[in-house]
Image (cartoon, rainbow, N blue to C red):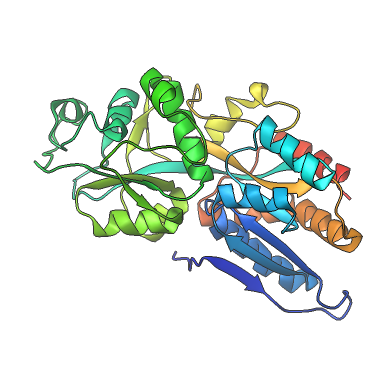
Amino acid sequence: MRFFLASALCVCVLSSNLPAQLQLNGAGATFPYVLYSKWFDVYKKKTGIQFNYQSIGSGGGIKQITDGTVDFGASDGPMTDEQLALARQKRGTDILHVPTTLGAVVIAYNLALPKPLQLTPDVLADIFLGVIKRWDDRRIAAINPGISLPSKPIVVVHRSDGSGTTAIFTDYLCKISNYWKQRYGQGTSVSWPKGTLGAKGNEGVAGQIKQTAGSIGYIELAYAEQNNLPYAAIKNYAGEFILPSLSEVTRAAESMLGTIPEDLRASITNSPRGYPISGFTWLLIPRKQSNPAKGKALADFLRWALTEGQAYCADLHYAPLPKSIAERALKKVALAH
């Protein structure tokens, strides 16, 4: 299956039983864009509600919901306490985190290999730190017996924009590498080691990897599938080499259910089981909308997305929410108006 990705989605069909020109404006994460574009299209056909969603990265989504220039934001990295406090100060209302789906951040590469590359956490961290510089490095070869690795330099590609995909990946790197944690840290934007290439959006990173022989980078699973890019099996906390898949993302989430806080701002990277670079993505919604009609329309859409809408996840390479998380998310939606 192939998907059309664009930098923005604008659906503009009206239904006679809805107020004219009712449109919900949103901005943020590229990670879930494939799924969101499907949801917006299906829901528009069901209800006539219009959506204008700008796929600009999670950092942009957080900024725009904080500034009040959109009705909802989207991010794969939860807002920090400081960001939530700033949004409350600017908008006079709390911002709620509503998880919508789960996905995998995959380590995609441009190499012709007979089978998927295997990477351990320490080797993966040292590739992105620039310590391991060539594909035929003995440490990579040791965990990939029987594969003839090319004698060529490794080209690391990262996100240049504020990105929730970056937040998930750097959260994982901080858990597996103390040096990474101390030197570069975690967030939607970090200062990358010298010599790495930046690209905008999941689509930009995927495109850069596709056109650069010997490159490696991190992207959401749907973008790797769309671009026919191979991706690595990562050794998880239990010592298993795991290829990203919907079932392994679900397994990762289920192994972390006991750690998810009341506000649903949760990390599930480096999970005890499943694929270790998995994460939630959230819609960021004001607890109180300045426009009551929009507040009701957004709440109605979220109730649909968290129930019927979950049926669209798997075909688009996203994992549906575990039932217990969907139920908790619906309670968050009930607080909004």
User: Height in image: 314 above or below 181?
Assistant: below
Q: Nearer the viewer, residue 28 or 67?
A: 67
Location of residue 295 in the rendering, given as x and y in whole percent from the top left corner? 85, 56
Q: Residue at x 46, y 55 (%)?
A: 201
- On screen, residue 262 versus residue 281, left or right, reads right
Q: Nearer the viewer, residue 176 or 243?
A: 176
Q: Residue at x 42, y 21 (%)?
A: 182
User: Height in image: 246 above or below 49?
Assistant: above
Location of residue 326 in the rendering, given as x and y in whole percent from the top left corner? 73, 41
- On screen, residue 138 versus residue 86, left or right, reads left
Task: Identify the image quadrant of residue 107.
Answer: top left
Q: Residue at x 40, y 37 (%)?
A: 191
- Residue 226 in view (yes/no): yes
Location of residue 214 in the rendering, given as x and y in whole percent from the top left corner? 20, 48
Q: Residue at x 52, y 35 (%)?
A: 187
Which residue lies most toward the left here? 151
- Location of the N terminus (image quadrant): bottom left
Q: Nearer the viewer, residue 132 or 105?
A: 132
User: Height in image: 282 above or below 175?
Assistant: below
Location of residue 173 in the rendering, given as x and y in whole percent from the top left corner? 42, 28
